[in-house]
Amino acid sequence: MAERSLAVNSHIQRWIPAAVVPAVIVVAAVAAPAVANADPALPEKSPAQVLELIAQSHGVPFSGTIEQSSALGLPDASAFGSAPGGDSASSALELLTGSHTANVFVGGTSTQRVQVLDRFAERDAIRNGDSVWLYDSDKKEAVHSTRAAGDTAPDSPAITPAEAAEKLLGAVAPSTAVEVVDTARVAGRPAYELRLTPNDADTLVGSVVLTVDSETGLPLGASITAAGASDPAFSVHFSKISFAAPDAALFDFTPPSDVTVKEHTVARPAPDAAADPGTAPKPTIVGDGWDAVAVFPAGTVGVGSLPKQLTTAVDGGRAVSTSLVSVLVTDDGRVLVGAVSTERLVAVAAQ
């Protein structure tokens, strides 16, 4: 397929995660390369047409198995063991090293289940309407969250797939080149390959490739290659998939009798409501593009159990650096994260 490209605005990283949610619903949890079959012959499409396909996939029911692999230059975090009660940072680190497998079931926009398979245990995230369960069979713990009675979400504005694609490409700028580069076959499905290449010398990301199902528009895989590298540093793909609606019983969960359950009620504020003083503050974003850095205030991100074997002393704190992302924990407790070098994080922290 002939390559066709266009530039996309510097905010592209804000919509990439939303576009690939079906395929990367377990991106922090669980890549097998595309099945080694001959590339399928498909009608040529422009980047805008492939983005329109992705927009059409919203709400498509499916179930399948996702395989993820990481080659970020970090050792397998399981080698260091788990900290007591492990925090979010250590859990994310463990899931971003080595390889992982997950079963994914999506019944629609309000029913999803992700089952991450460990050696002798499993972790589940189940959403069924206003009810969300997080379950860890190894720790024998479960967290159940529900929305407050009468809490309703505002309706989303209506938008067609074509309008969604147009909005994504509407503010054109030279930060990213988008190309439909090839076709592929993933989990037996013919797909288009959409490549995004940052035009930013300060980012560690060399390119992102989304593999998009040619019929449903569902992203079947995503891979990220570091700048200057030839092989992906992070990849997640379906190894098998079915577009039959999953059994509704999969979204009902009753914890085993020996599991400790914590209950939470979550009330969403009205769109014009003032922020709840008890709500954790959002990070400050420094920069606007692929080299943007998220700065979290002290105490808002758990980093206490990060293995010290993975961190390096730098000016003002300790850092973890990989081929795709760097993390800096400052001496005053702030956490800085970005797809940039440690040096940039140190410079931002000093501002």
Image (cartoon, rainbow, N blue to C red):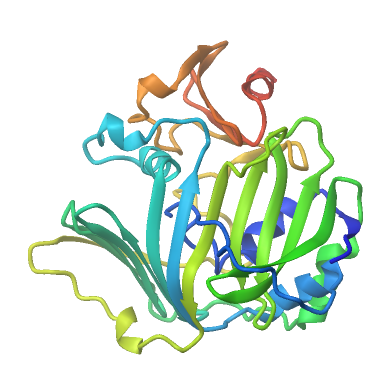
Question: Taking the image as drawn, is residue 328 in sight?
Answer: no
Judged from this view, the residue extending furthest toward the left is: 258
Residue 326 lies left or right of residue 55; in this view the side is left
| Displayed quadrant of residue 348 | top right
Furthest residue to the front? 38
Which residue is more in the foreground, 51 or 45?
45
Q: Who is closer to the viewer here, 131 or 223?
A: 223
Quarter of the picture containing the C terminus is: top right
Name the residue: 55% across, 69% down: 22
Quadrant in which the N terminus is drawn = bottom right
Query: How far from the left and from the top, in percent, is residue 235?
Result: 55, 51
The answer to whether residue 209 is above or below residue 35 is above
Compared with 197, 303 (above or below) is above
Residue 261: give x, y in percent of width and height: 19, 62
Question: Is 35 displayed left or right of 63 in the figure?
Answer: right
Residue at 83% across, 59% down = 179
Quadrant of the rendered structure where residue 137 is? bottom left
**Residue at 47% in and 54% down:** 68
Q: Is residue 6 above or below residue 297?
A: below
| Residue 331 position in % (x across, y down) | 48, 17
What is the total number of numbered labels drawn onto the structure image? 0
- Residue at image point 62% right, 70% down: 185
**Residue 317 in view, yes or no:** yes
**Residue 330 pos. (x, y %):** 51, 21
Residue 10 placement, left or right of 228: right
